[in-house]
Amino acid sequence: MAKNEDILRRLTAAIGAHRKADPVQSYVATLFAKGDDAIIKKIGEEATEAVMAAKDGDKIRLTAEIADLWFHCLVLLVRHGIGPEAVLAELERREGISGLEEKASRH
């Protein structure tokens, strides 16, 4: 599992390294240059594509679309100065708590 967690760290570092690159040369820099709205729109697109792949029962496409979704979520996190460790810590905090209880605690 450590290797899987390491990919999040490496991707986050790569996103951070490309955030100020030339947008002509870097997709990540293009997203950063366009701002939150572009990143959020991309997350919405990827989420929709993941839903469509799931509805079609296409596991290979679903896996690829979820990877795209996670990547763009990492871009948004980096833009806001949040690392994947914060999300992992939140998931760990929720572990063992009923989803219904956790949701109720937020209202």
Image: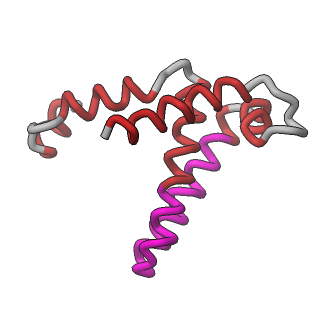
Magenta region: which residues? 39-66
Residue 65 horizontal side relative to residue 101, left or right: right
**How many numbered tags mark residues here?**
0
Could you tell me residue 30's position as x and y percent? Answer: 79, 37
Q: Is residue 49 above or below residue 43?
A: below
Residue 58 in which image quadrant: bottom left
Could you tell me residue 104's position as x and y percent? Answer: 15, 37
Identify the residue at horizontal 64%, vertical 31% (top origin): 15
Identify the residue at horizontal 87%, vertical 30% (top origin): 22
Prevailing SS of the magenta stretch: helix
Residue 30 horizontal side relative to residue 78, left or right: right
Identify the image quadrant of the C terminus.
top left
**Residue situated furthest top in the rendering:** 81
Residue sitting nearer the eye, 15 or 102: 15
Residue 55 in which image quadrant: bottom left
**Residue situated furthest front in the rendering:** 3
Identify the residue at horizontal 56%, vertical 22% (top origin): 80
Identify the residue at horizontal 47%, vertical 35% (top origin): 8
Q: Is residue 22 above or below residue 66?
A: above
Could you tell me residue 6's position as x and y percent? Answer: 44, 33
Specify whether residue 27 is painted magenta: no
Residue sitting nearer the eye, 47 or 58: 58
Specify whether residue 48 is painted magenta: yes
Identify the image quadrant of the N terminus.
top left
Could you tell me residue 53's position as x and y percent? Answer: 48, 73
Residue 47 horizontal side relative to residue 85, left or right: right
